[in-house]
Amino acid sequence: MAQTNSKQSTQPVTVRIDSLFNRGLGTPEDAVQTYFWAQRDRNSDMYFHSLTPRNLNRIRNASELTWAPLDNFVSFDIAARRDLNATTVQLGIRFHSAAYPQNGSQEIIVQLVLQGGEWRVDADGN
């Protein structure tokens, strides 16, 4: 059986939206929480800093910064992790709605790239 360097997490980490804070960009998990914290608090400096240059340029070229509607969610799980290589990681994120629990959860994949010693969100990385 071939060995793989892919690291898969099996235990979800649950993060309450109201408990988010700036955790820095030292790990993919910290970076994604910092990214969502910056969105929740509309902290454009940290939001821009948490993005790869490619995404930063795309957003700066947009006519208006659109903030994610995190108010609709009470928490999210970092439900899965896939290390594509030493500098690229995908995190499976599952958001939980307080207002509409019958709608289930919303799931996304966030790709992060290690650049300059910091993990940054690469939203167009697919």
Image (spheres, helix red, strand yellow):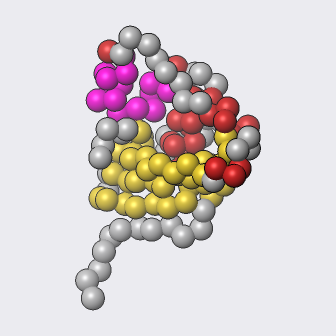
How would you classify the magenta stretch by its main secondary structure? Answer: helix
Image coordinates for residue 88, horizontal then vertical, percent: 33, 51
Residue closest to the far top: 63
Q: Does 24 sit left or right of 71 as displayed?
A: left
Extreme front residue here?
102
- Is 5 placed above or below 64 here? below
Residue drawn at (40%, 53%) of the image: 90
- Whether residue 74 is visible to the viewer of this picture, yes or no, is no
Quadrant of residue 6 within the rendered picture: bottom left
54 drawn magenta: yes
Residue occupying the point 30% across, 43% down: 125
Residue 15 x/y as whole percent: 67, 49
For image coordinates 25% across by 83% down, the residue present is 2
Residue drawn at the location 62% of the way across and 34% of the way down: 70
Q: Which residues are magenta?
A: 47-60
Whether residue 9 appears in magenta in the rendering, the answer is: no
- Asked if residue 106 shows in the view, the reply is yes
